[in-house]
Amino acid sequence: MAGLEMRRVVDEDEGVRPAPANRNAAWDWDRMCAYYTNKIVRIQDANLGYLYWGIVSLILIYIQVVVFHIEGRHSFQEPGIGAVITKFQAKAFGTDGKAFDAPDLRHPIIEPSGAFITTRRITVKGQTLGDCVDRDNPDPCPCGKGRGVCDTEQNQCVVRGWCPSIGEQNVANPPAGAVVENITGIEKAVLKITAGIGFPSIGAKFHVAGSMEDSSQLHKHITVKEILDLSDPPVKLEDVYEKGCIIAVNFFWNCDLTWVNECEPLLSVKRVDDGTGFSQKRARKRRENGVDLRDATYMYGLRFIVDSSGIGRQVSLVPIVIQIGSCLALVQIASKAADFLMLNMYDKERSNAYYRLKVKETQDYADLQERIHLIQEQKARAQADISSGVVRSGTAGESVAFGLGAGGRGAMSSVLRGRNTGARGSSG
C-alpha cells in the first residue's frame, strides 16, 4: 500500500532557508548553527531621536563621571587593615607645686590606639567598708526589701559600700577630706603617633604615614595644643580643663595603587563627646592595722582615640566589564522611553501608524492544540475503512479529509492524499 502523508498544518516559517537537495538535512550546519538577529525599524522622527540620544548621553556621562571617576567602581577595592601606636611625653605641675610626668598623667600607661591625659583629679583617701549612699549608682527611695534603708534627708537608699562615696552625683561637691588637684602645662605635652595600613590583596606592602617625600611629619611629634587647634571645630584647653573631652584622631587612606605603590593618609581631628566631657575612676586598695582601706580617684582629662582605616584600589578588568554591562543595560531605558513616547504620547493616528511599523501581528493559532485529536480520530477511521474493504487502498484518503476542519487555518481543511496517481484516475 502506498504510504500516506499529511500536509503540514503550519506553513514554512518566513525567512527560513530551505535545505539544499544534495545535502543531508540532519547535518545541515547552516541550520544547526543559524544566527538570529533582531530586525530594526528606523523611525525618522527628530523628537524620538532627541529623547533617545539625550538619555543615552546622560547614561554615558553618569558611567564616566560618577561610576568611574568619583566612585572608582572600575577598580578592585579592598578595606585596609590599619594599626597605630601612640607614645606620650609630658611634664606638668599641680597648683600646689607638685610635679607630674607621663606615668602620672596617662592612664593606662600603655594604650596603642590612643591616650588619656589627666587635667584634673579628685581623690578620696582612706575609704572604709560601711553603710552610706552610693554616689556612683544612687538608688532613690523607697528602697524596697533587700535594697537598703531610706535616708529621708537625702531621699536616697543607704547601702553597703565604700564610704564616704564619690561618684558622678557628688564629684562637683566632693565629701570632706577629698583632695582636688588641678594640673597645668598639659598644652605642651607631646604625642608621637605612628599610623599605617595594609591591603593584603593588593600587594604585601605596609604603608606608613609620613614615609613619602614631602609628606607631613606633624603627627610624629605633635603637642596637645596643636591637636586641639586642628580639631573641627577648634577646641580650647581652658574650655575642657574641668570636665575633659574626647578627641578622635583619624588617619583616612584612599590609595590608588594601580601605577604607584605609595600612599599617604588624610588627617582628621574632631571632638566627639558632644560637650559631656570624659572622666574615669580608679581605685587602689590597701590594708592598715587589720582594716581594709581604699583610695578612690576621679580623673578628668583629654581622651584621644587614634584610628587608621581606608580603602585600597587597583584597576581591574573584571569590574570594568561589569560596569560596561551595566551601561548597556541602562541604555535600554532610552529605548523604552522612546517607545512610550512613540506609542502613547502622539496623536492617535500617528501612534497607530508607528504601532503598525513596530508590531507585526500574527493569526490566532490558540485553538490548534485542541484540534490535534480530530486529526488522530480521522486517521484511525480511515485505517479502519481500508482494513474492512469499504475503501480501496489505492483510493484511500482520496475523499477523507484530515486536519483541523473548516476554520482551523484560513477556513481550509487538510486533505489526506494518496501517492498512487493511477488510483486517483480510477476513482473518477
Image (spheres, rainbow, N blue to C red):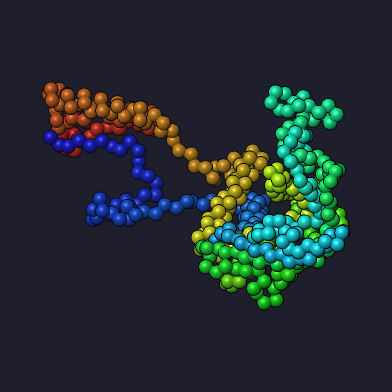
Q: From what the image shows, is residue 407 above or below residue 57?
A: above
Residue most extreme to the front: 289
**Can residue 253 be seen by looking at this rendering?**
no
Instruction: Give the image quarter of residue 291.
Output: top right
Q: Which residue shows up at 31% across the image and 29% down it?
A: 372
Q: Which residue shows up at 79% across the image and 49% down it?
A: 123
Instruction: Give the image quarter of residue 258.
Output: bottom right
Q: Which residue shows up at 35% across the image and 27% down it?
A: 370
Image quarter where the C terminus lies is top left
Q: In the image, residue 283 lies at what x, y percent?
A: 71, 48
Q: How many marks?
A: 0
Q: In the image, residue 301 lies at what x, y percent?
A: 78, 54
Q: In the image, residue 8 lies at what x, y percent?
A: 30, 38
Q: From what the image shows, is residue 47 above or below residue 366?
A: below
Residue in the foreground of this view, choosing between 324 and 244: 244
Q: Which residue shows up at 13% across the image and 25% down it?
A: 387
Image quarter where the N terminus lies is top left
Residue in the foreground of this view, choosing between 330 and 206: 206
**Can residue 359 be seen by looking at this rendering?**
yes
